[in-house]
Amino acid sequence: MNTLTQSNPTIRIAPPACFEVFHDACATPDGVAHDADTDVMDTYDATSLDYPLIGEPACGTHLVTQRRGYEHHGVYVGHGRVVHYAGFADAAQRAPVEEVTIECFARGQTMWARLHPFAKYTGEEAVARARSRLGEDRYRLLTNNCEHFCVWCLFGEARSKQVEACLAHPRIAIRTVASLARALIGYGRRSGRFAAQAV
């Protein structure tokens, strides 16, 4: 067992070679893989798959962990570190893009990889893109959140399936906003302060 799984028991282990199996499964029904002319974001929608981690993730892996009412996203950059848009993930006050330990990113929750076999940027190139935005402090829940950040790092376009789902399904939006509000109010009570930021 590697040090990541020893220090963080929430990391799940999957069978080896899952990426190759997943890549084969993403071929079109006639067995032909997507070509370069396919719209990047259509590929993101059609071929993204959540999969348990295989020990230490590869550099540039899109990581996801559950938060109260939403999923939080980051890019694995190696050596047990993740770059993510902190946003409201750790406080009631908006925070910038930062590099943290994988344990800090997971916050004790189960974590998984969101695999994208047709990402435009992978490995060290995705890592460089993530690190190029370190310190950026322009988080916006609907237009520039942690998922927008990760998708930009891998595909070159900012997009959030969570936001799209909320906008398409008002009941999901109401539940998500209520969960976020409860989490922020709870944080404000625990810390003795509450800072409101514009979305």
Image (cartoon, rainbow, N blue to C red):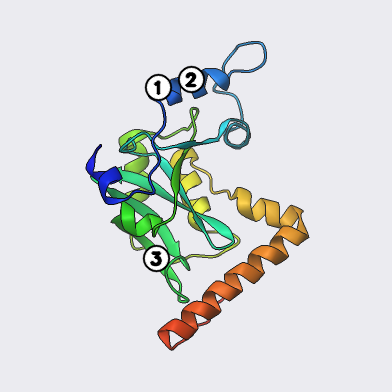
Question: Which labelled disc corresponds to residue 96?
Answer: 3
Instruction: Kindly state the secondary structure of the residue where label 1 is placed.
Output: loop
Residue designated by label 2:
21
Indicate the amino acid at tag 1: Ala
Residue designated by label 1:
17
Indicate the amino acid at tag 2: Val
Q: Which residue is drawn at 61% across and 26% down?
A: 38
Circles 1 and 2 in contact, beta carbons < 8 Å: yes
Spot occupied by residue 189 in the image (x, y as percentages of width and height)? 48, 85
Asked which quadrant contains residue 113, the reply is top left
Residue occupying the far bottom of the picture: 192
Looking at the rendered image, the disc whose residue lies closer to the viewer, 3 or 2, is 2
Indicate the amino acid at tag 3: Pro
Q: How crowded is mark 1: few (under 14 residues within 10 Å), some or many (20 or more)?
A: few
Q: Residue at x 35, y 53 (%)?
A: 83
Q: Which of marks 1 and 3 is nearer the N terminus?
A: 1
Instruction: Kindly state the secondary structure of the residue where label 2 is placed.
Output: helix
Asked which quadrant contains residue 97, the reply is bottom left
Q: Is residue 189 visible?
A: yes
Of the 4 image quadrants, the one containing the N terminus is top left
Q: Which residue is drawn at 69% across and 64% down?
A: 175
Question: Which labelled disc corresponds to residue 195?
Answer: none
Foreground pick, 60 / 35: 60
Whole-number angstrom distance, CA of label 1 to CA of label 3: 35 Å
Q: How crowded is mark 3: few (under 14 residues within 10 Å), some or many (20 or more)?
A: some
Is residue 38 shown left or right of residue 91?
right
Position of residue 44 relative to residue 102, above or below, is: above
Spot occupied by residue 115 in the image (x, y as percentages of width and height)? 48, 34
Asked which quadrant contains residue 128, the reply is top left
Spot occupied by residue 36 in the image (x, y as percentages of width and height)? 54, 23
